[in-house]
Image (cartoon, coloured by chain):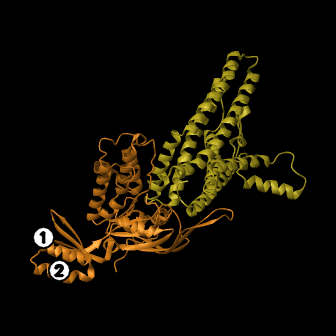
Amino acid sequence: MTAAALEFQAVTKTYRKRLGGQEVPALTHVSFRVAPGEACAFLGPNGAGKTTSISILMGFLYADWGRIQVLGYEPGDVRAKNKIGFMPENFAFYKHLNAEKLLRFHAKLAGVAKDKAGGLIRELLAKVKLDGFGKLKIGRYSRGMVQRVGIAQALLGDPDLLVLDEPTSGLDPAGRKEVRDLILALKALGKTIFLSSHILSEVEQICNQAIIIDRGRVVRAGPMNELLATGDQVEIVVDRLTEEFEVALRERGAAVERSAQGVRIVIGSQHKREVVEQLWSAGCDVVSLQPVRGSLEELYMKLVGSGEPA
Amino acid sequence: MKLRTIALNTFGLFLRDRLLIIFGVLFLCVILLMMTPLLVVKARTTTSNMQQAQTYVLDLVATTMFMVSGAGSLLAAWAAADTVASEMKSGTILAVMARPVKRWEFLLGKYMGVLLLMAIYVVMMFGLSYLLAWMGGQRLQSSSWILLVYPMLRYAIYAAIAMAVATVAHQVLSWGLTLMLGVAAALVVPGPDQPHNLALRWLKTGLYYALPSTDFLSEDRFLTIKHATLRQTGWLEHLTTVAYGLDYAVVILLLAMWSFHYRSLKRD
């Protein structure tokens, strides 16, 4: 098994109020593993323990119990932080700085050589579509522009692991798409991405793994394909289908949809072999056969119940 | 490099801190008001009342410098208590601490930023003392380094205490507690009326050295500003006093670092 980029083993965290106050369990035996190069979604309703988990992995909070490894190091270890790009939720910034100066400040902390910093900052600002705004004070930016600066600072130092907490919050649809494309490009470069987001459709497009957490416990984790596969139904797409065959299929409980691209048949997986053989015999060309995928939203609502996703 | 970056950024934040700007403006007004009598005295000085004028001017300089010095303690304690707290409140600490920066480096960088602010304050205070004396037509005969090093040591201690308390408590509480310690230290300064009870006397002496004593670390101990002279003091005494001050500041700063290491970093 390859070394995990990120690993939680039975991590437990309880918030204690001072002077013998109430104890609030935030995480209870949370375990998960993210392999290098994976894009992992970290999902859950508000108060589920997402921010606590992210704070623990970044070394901001200490877990009460459990083992955490980030890029092979303890959380908070500077050797790990050297390779992490982090974008906190509602990225906060120094209002007196402009984007260039803020990125320069972060570049210095990240140990980027002075002679390389200028070029890198220009490149990053162009990447997040903020070229031309580098000298404008961040206090005068729109929320979307602030988010973009946050993403730019997370990309400083060419990180191996990107921890992104709601990176597209506050962005308009075009901005969301740009950020999504940027994350997909980083994923294609082999970067590990740990993404917390409430925009499930976006997560579904970016991530190939998901962890769903609720009330401090992991309720489902695994590859996206496995999580979304319903398991009991298959989808067969054929180029054409006779009326008689359609009636026969419907009698067996199949759903049939006709479109310009072909005919989509959804049928119980126990009938798949028999139906495909009959389709071939009838001269239909089977274009594809795959398990039916549910949507992430359906899965999320099923697992988390009425917990509000946004 | 990281420490310098954090320190300079902290200093930049201070220069834009509204509360500190208001403090500076108010204080400047008070200083300007106090300059007026000096100019009047200078204008009215004749050969017959020169001795009286000198005493008056140096009294006024001493009073002003006492106020400026006290205000510096307030400033040092507030700046140190607020600098970490404001980063927590705004959430900027999260992006900074996500960088390869150790917790102690962050705190030390912040502390250095406070010291930079206070160094500028001390230099201004130094310039002001000479300016006031000059305006009153007098000259201060003193050793410059004493006027620079001793206030700086005091402020370093106040800043370290305020920072240490601010790692576990609200910044206003931290500021208040630091000032209370300063006042308590002033109350236990050994004077002519020492308690007869031996235990009480020991307690008072112990507290005098344990508390951040502004008297012990005061340049006034070595200067007799009212007579514009410098008390002859051996280097050993200076070395001992400076070492005490540095030791005090370093120990408290280490305590602050230890406390900060275990604290949760989150947006307050």
Going 11% across and 75% down the picture, which residue do you hit?
Answer: A284
Horizontal and vertical percent for residue A58?
46, 63
Q: Residue furthest right?
A: B196
Residue closest to the eye, B177 or A280: A280
Q: Nearer the viewer, residue A14 or B13?
A: A14
Q: Which kind of residue does numbered mark 1 sit on?
A: Arg
Tell me the number on the disc at residue A276: 2
Query: Quarter-wise, where is residue A221 in the image?
Result: bottom left
Chain letter corresponding to the colour yellow: B
Q: Chain of mark 2?
A: A
Q: Secondary structure at mark 1?
A: loop
Please indicate whether residue B211 sits to the left or right of residue A173 in the image.
Answer: right
Residue A22 lies, with reference to residue B66, above or below; the image says below
**Helix, strand or loop at disc 2?**
helix
Residue A42 left/right relative to A229: right
Chain A display color: orange
Q: Chain of mark 1?
A: A
